[in-house]
Image (cartoon, rainbow, N blue to C red):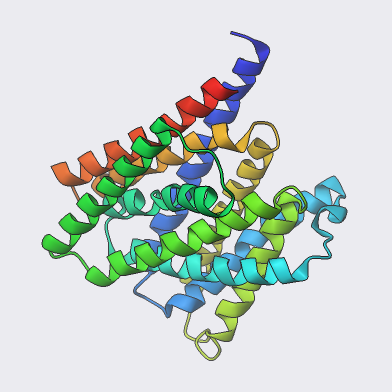
Amino acid sequence: MSQLESKKHVIYILGTVAFFLFSIADTIIKLIGDLYKDTVIFSIASFSAIIPVLFYLLYRKSLEEIKTSNYKLHFIRGILMTLTYYFVVKGIILLPLSIAYPIILSAPVLLSIMGIVILKESIYLSKIISLILAMIAVFMVSGFSLNAGFNALGVIFLILGVISLACLDFTVRVYGKSERTMALTFYSMGITGIIFTVFSINHYKDIALYDFLIMVGAGLIDGVAMMILIYSLRRIEASFFSITHYSQIIFGIIISIVVFNHYPSIIELCGAILIIISGYLVYSKLKKLN
């Protein structure tokens, strides 16, 4: 195994750890999601997620990394991040993770379509098959969720979250070369926290200290996971690294069983497998091209 391939394997492991941490944070918020106003939980978690980023910047003495002149971009990303966070986490709270994650991970499908239509990116057979498989999976899992009596609003939230997430990722694809990753992360999370705080005024006084610490903990875990992603994305092509994202489906199934005692149906498992295959098709094609 070459040194480059060995390095990629280490980065893949780090990516898997990052998405495991995201899954843990989602689980924590899901457990307390019904106890307080949703925007209160989101605002505390959003601001807490910035703390590891700030510690990293201070440790590196590299505040230059968040300097920017494109404030309009960061404001738009902040709004998109707010919508993504709200819709996705609300969907996660209302639905089992084994249903939520396959729907959420269809976002790359919409992103690919946007790239083809807007950026005129090349299209090839494996990408077409990948898109078709992902769409089938989303319809399967969503349809099963509705037919099985799970919260229909949760499915709607997740679909809206997928749309906003794809738009958020699209801004990175378009402006990622001119704006640093740290700046994109720092400002979007900061603006998200501010927006949620505005909608949470007068709702903070009844929060128990223990629950507050849980919300902070979820945010800190998200922040650490973001740091791992930033570290990894600087050392390997984003197109290769994206395959680790699909590990979250597996974590979702395990957490659903162990924590929430929800055993996924055959439809949920098939949908998850189709999403994973869809992602691998794009990954394998990119690997051949590179």
Res. 265 in view: no
Looking at the figure, which quarter contains the N terminus? top right
- Write down the quadrant of residue 170 in the picture: bottom right
Pick the front one: 260 or 193:
193
Pick the front one: 216 or 169:
169
Pick the front one: 155 or 18:
155
Horizontally, residue 70 falls left or right of residue 280, namely right
**x and y percent of residue 134 in the render?**
33, 44
Q: Residue at x 38, y 50 (%)?
A: 106
Q: Residue at x 39, y 54 (%)?
A: 104
Horizontally, residue 186 falls left or right of residue 48, namely right
- Write down the quadrant of residue 45 in the picture: bottom right
Q: How many marks?
A: 0
Q: Is 203 drawn above or below residue 113 in the view shown?
A: below
Looking at the figure, which quarter contains the C terminus? top right
Q: Residue at x 65, y 31 (%)?
A: 236
Q: Is 277 drawn above or below residue 179 in the view shown?
A: above
**x and y percent of residue 15 in the render?**
54, 36
Q: Is 92 drawn above or below residue 232 in the view shown?
A: below
**x and y percent of residue 247 in the render?**
41, 37
Res. 282 in view: yes
Pick the front one: 85 or 35:
85
Q: Is 233 drawn above or below residue 281 in the view shown?
A: below
Q: Residue at x 47, y 85 (%)?
A: 206
Q: Residue furthest bottom?
A: 202
**x and y percent of residue 143 in the render?**
18, 58
Q: Residue furthest top?
A: 1
